[in-house]
Amino acid sequence: MKTGRHQALEVAGHDHHHRSITTGGARAAVFGVSDGLVTNVSLILGMAGAQSSQGVVRLAGLAGMIAGAFSMATGEYVSMRAQAELFERELALERREIARRPEGERRELVKIYENRGVDPEAARRLADEMMRTPELALETHAREELGIDPNALGSPVLAAASSFATFAVGALLPLLPWLFVGGTAAIVASVVIGVVASIAVGVALAVFTGRPWWFSALRQLGISTVAAAVTYGIGRAVGISGVH
């Protein structure tokens, strides 16, 4: 027979076996490569479609890679920092309520457990066990009421660093041919690299999300193809003048 402590731990830690994604690093890394690839393959082919010289395309690609990497890193840092600050504020409010009115907070837990189908008597035992220590009470209320883990609020620095590095990697791939050659050969090479990289990113996303690999790969390839085709077409239609 399970003790109240064991039941409490089971309820409070019901997501123990789920993959932790709250730090933001893995999410930022996976989508950073995708964003970098789509952004720069579109930019490079758009410039190439305008019949730009190798030097112009290379400069545009480098500028897009650096600017995009800094933009992604800044966006991830600001969003993760704001999210962490919001969570910290909510946790501070919850900590204050636990200290000021523990009986009211205990009744809230009982109600939550009862709404989830737990027997009223068992719900009261679980709530009593959770409220024994302030930190356990805070963690339980944070999980059950706010849906957050106070020990995993995310790392803005990790998210920003992952975004910067992975965006740069994704953006560098279609740029590589233009570091050595230009013209049609570089365009074809960028397209081939873009196709292969898009499929690889799609497969990686499937591993991360659990979706079928072929679906994820085709989706990523389709998105990259549409973006590159549109910008290439615009480049061909508009062109550039006076730049050699």
Image (cartoon, grey):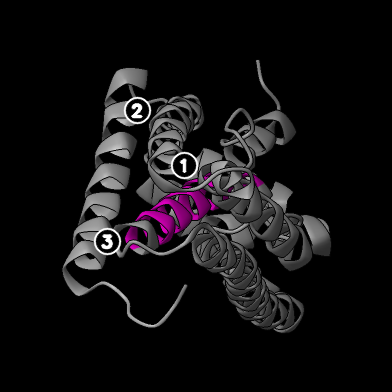
Q: Residues within 10 Å of mark 2 (few under 14, many from 20)?
A: many
In the image, which is nearer the foreground, mark 1 or mark 3? 1
Q: Residues within 10 Å of mark 3 (few under 14, many from 20)?
A: many
Q: Which secondary structure, mark 1?
A: helix
In the image, which is nearer the foreground, mark 2 or mark 1? 1
- Mark 1 vs mark 3: which is more N-terminal? 1
Residue type, mark 2 in image: Ala
**Residue labelled with disc 3:** 231
Q: Is residue 182 left or right of residue 221?
A: right
Q: Main secondary structure of the magenta part?
A: helix
Check residue 217 in the rendering and tell me which mark sits there, or answer none.
Answer: 2
Q: Is residue 4 visible?
A: yes
The answer to which of 84 and 190 lies nearer the viewer is 190
Question: Residue 42 colored magenta?
Answer: yes
Q: Which secondary structure, mark 3?
A: helix
Q: Position of residue 169 (x, y in %)?
A: 64, 47
Residue type, mark 3 in image: Thr
* Number of dots carrying numbers: 3
Q: CA distance from mark 1 to mark 3?
A: 16 Å
- Mark 2 vs mark 1: which is more N-terminal? 1
**Residue labelled with disc 1:** 186
Q: Which image quadrant: the N terminus?
A: top right
Q: CA distance from mark 2 to mark 1?
A: 24 Å
Q: Which residues are magenta?
A: 26-46
The answer to which of 168 and 243 lies nearer the viewer is 243
The answer to which of 160 and 115 lies nearer the viewer is 160
Q: Is residue 24 visible?
A: no
Q: Which secondary structure, mark 2?
A: helix
Q: Is residue 29 above or below residue 64?
A: above
